[in-house]
Amino acid sequence: MNARRNPDNVAAALVLFVLLAVGAALVGGIFLGRSTKGTSSAPATTTAAAQAVDPRVAAGAHDFVNFACAQCHGLDGKGGVSRYVPALKNLALTTAELKQIINHGAGVSANPTHPYMPVWGQVISDRQVDDLVAYIHAGLPAVPTATPIAVPTGQGAAVEGQALYSVYGCINCHGPNGLGGVPNPQSPDKTIPPLSGADFFKQFDTDAKITDVIVSGSVLGRAPIVSMPHWGGIIPANRLNALVAYIKTLKGNT
Ligand code: HEC
Ligand code: HEC
């Protein structure tokens, strides 16, 4: 009995051991496979990108998109958007000159008939201006993910307009949801106007009135006063309609 049972037990134990070992290897393999994939693929690209670009240059590239410099000067400053807006490649401008232009503009005329360099000093921080200068001096290299957000189509003009409100950097001056509140200390109102509220919709009571001010701009005074940029020739007609449709969804339009 003992002699017969023992080999059986040994065989059973062996089978069990082999099964367990194979099972463990399979399970381990799957988990290891998953975890190597999980840790290597996605973060690896991010790490590579972060190593390839100086952080100050990368920050400047993102600012260039977020403040809509790219919408007037072209992506990576390549130009080609409007004959009034220069490309920013191979600029022979010093740090001091670049800071002056970004903070104070390039001397706007009182009644602009074409796009002019906006005054950013009240809106963009010194650190962000430094980063923009680093990016321009680095030759405006393409930086991964420093690209404008996608604009949805086929979902109505207001949805498109909401994205465009960020793409064209309106949000930086007029606040999220057009709520306003961005300081403009030297201007009569001391603040950049909201694009919402009863007073706004009373004054801008037609699509044409809203479109007109976006296209023409409106100069409140010289730097450091921030004025409304002139977007004529920059924003195409269908996108202007979308921006207006979005603005009309904001608070206070009854
Ligand atoms: C509404 C369009 C518009 C936007 C937005 C804009 N610019 Fe400009 N920029 C211009 C125009 C137009 C000029 C040419 C000077 C002028 O006519 O005012 C200019 C000039 C410049 C110059 C001087 C170029 C040269 O050759 O002398 C620099 C540098 C510059 N812009 C950087 C920027 C940066 C950085 C941003 C974003 C923070 C920006 N611009 C956003 C329209 C724009
Ligand atoms: C650099 C800051 C700046 C940016 C960017 C900007 N605006 Fe303005 N905007 C102003 C200022 C300042 C005024 C006030 C002008 C005035 O009172 O004459 C203004 C006025 C307006 C007005 C009229 C509101 C009023 O009460 O006078 C509308 C509408 C408007 N902006 C829409 C837009 C849209 C849409 C965008 C994006 C495409 C945009 N703005 C981008 C600064 C900005």
Image (cartoon, rainbow, N blue to C red):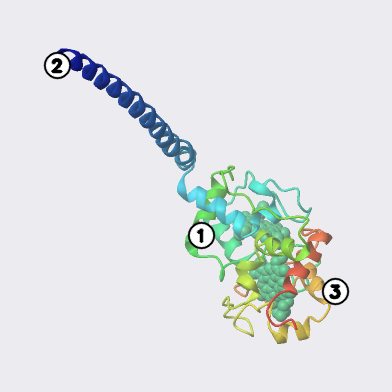
Mark 3 — residue?
208
The residue under the point 56% across, 77% down is 183
Q: Nearer the viewer, residue 211 or 189?
A: 211
Image spot of residue 246 (x, y percent): 73, 69
**Badge 1 amino acid:** Gln
Q: Nearer the viewer, residue 237 or 72?
A: 237
Q: Residue 2: which disc?
A: 2
C-alpha span from label 2 to label 1: 84 Å
C-alpha span from label 3 to label 1: 35 Å
**Badge 3 amino acid:** Ala
* Helix, strand or loop status at disc 3: helix
Instruction: Compare marks 3 and 1 and give the one earlier in the sequence.
Output: 1
Asked whether the residues under the numbered discs 3 and 2 touch, taking CB atoms below 8 Å apart as contact, a structural biologist would say no
Please give the count of numbered marks on the rendered protein.
3
Mark 1 — residue?
128
* Helix, strand or loop status at disc 2: helix
Q: Which of pointers 3 and 1 indicates the residue nearer the eye?
A: 3
On the question of residue 222 being in view, the answer is no
In the picture as drawn, the residue positioned furthest to the front comes out as 1
Against 78, residue 125 (above or below) is below
Image spot of residue 143 (x, y percent): 56, 44
Q: Quadrant of residue 254?
A: bottom right
Against 11, residue 104 (above or below) is below
Local packing at callout 1 (Cα closer than 10 Å; few below 14, some 14-19, many 20+) is some
